[in-house]
Image (tube, grey):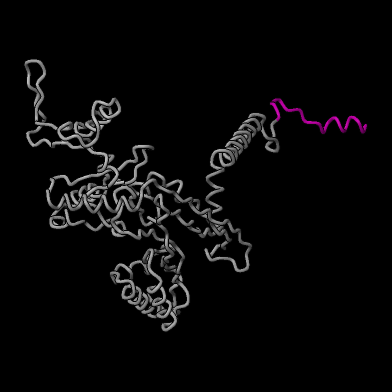
Amino acid sequence: MKKSREKKNVVKMNREFTSQNFIHTRSLKVIFVITIIFLVSLLIRLAFIQFVDGDYLKEKAYSQQTINQIISPKRGNIYDSTGKVLASSVPVDTITINPQKFKLDTDEETIALKEKVAKGLSDIFTLDYQETLDKLNSSSQVETIVRKVEHDKVETLKTWMKENEVDVGINIDEDTKRFYPYDNLLSNVLGFCGTDNNGLVGIESTYNSTLQGTPGKIVSSKGSDQEEIPNAEETYIPADNGSDITLTIDFNVQSVVEEYLKQACLNLKPKNGGTGIVMDPKTGKILAMATYPDYNLNKPSTPNENISATYNKLSTEEQNNALHTMWKNKCVSDLYEPGSVFKLITASAALEEGITTPDVPGDFYCNGSEKVEDREISCWTTGHIRSFISSWSFREIL
């Protein structure tokens, strides 16, 4: 009876049973595929950051977390063959500011402080007041006020800072400046350096890698506020000073050549100036190399007397071209017809073969033309130079 009663409670259904409590197999597949795609994309992105952008991001993080104070190396000296210093580096200072450190309790006090500092700096270093004030209002971490100033100006600045109770924000950094003790001597050969102590023309440029040395630095840490962390560990890397260079130039010979070259150019007034070279005939060493007009190496951007009269009337491009022409060493950069120079070869061959001897009148004379068979060949110009060569003249110069 009990079994028959249980069977009567069983209900038979004529359709397939479905329930909302189970997830369909197709949905599971879609979710699985999406998850795999997401994980693969994440791995690809991580690999890209690690292997492609890794160096860049590492360098960026390093720059945000560290302070590098560059230590400038001392540039090597340039000597003549007798040991005289033709170019050296003297100690100077560079003045910079940290605009963000000029802040007081109120905006009015901050503005007044910046105006006072701008007035002081512009008066001491003869700068434009508004340009100096703009630098104090800059959002940059560091602004350069003036480069390579002498110590008397720096002492004046220190006195002003003490009197006005300005303790932070103004930095006095040690630096060096190129100095040429003889001003114009050998100017077109030596060349000069820019404000970064890198050679721009002449020997200074050609041997720049030898002279400049390798900068050093002091590495320290800074926090999220971009301020240096007190008592943090510092890494000191010393600067490697540049090497010295000794030229074959003889100071005494160079001085004599420049003096007489200048005198000849002032008397004869050649259109393109003049050049002079003295070489040791036994070794080929250059004892003197002069160009006139020359310029002052300590003021290379100041026009010499040859271009100063019309310099201010020129356009900016024309002024730059005029200065580059003034700096040029015409002894090695300009072309010329080697006719008269080759006369030395002819005379030397005649002396070596015993055809003639020194100081024989008329042996080295040019009358302006030479007859070859039935044709007369004349010099290139009627104003040719008669050439007399004698051994005593060489001895007098050397």
Where's residue 103, x and y in %?
44, 75
Number of labels in the image equals 0
Q: Find residue 206 and report its image quarter.
A: top left
Is residue 124 rendered to the left or right of residue 44?
A: left
Identity of the residue drawn at 43% across and 48% down: 246
Say if the magenta span includes residue 8: yes
54 or 191, which lies in front?
191
Q: Is residue 121 magenta?
A: no
Position of 60 with respect to 265 (left or right) is right
> Which stretch appears magenta?
1-17
Q: Nearer the viewer, residue 161 or 242?
A: 242
Query: What residue is rendered at 56% in x and 62% in y?
Result: 222
Where is residue 46? Give x, y as percent: 59, 40
Q: Quadrant of residue 129?
A: bottom left
Q: Position of residue 348 (x, y in %)?
A: 27, 30
| Most foreground residue, 104 or 349 | 349
Q: Residue at x 83, y 31 (%)?
A: 8
Q: Is residue 92 left or right of residue 256?
A: right
Up/down of 58 relative to 85, above or below: above
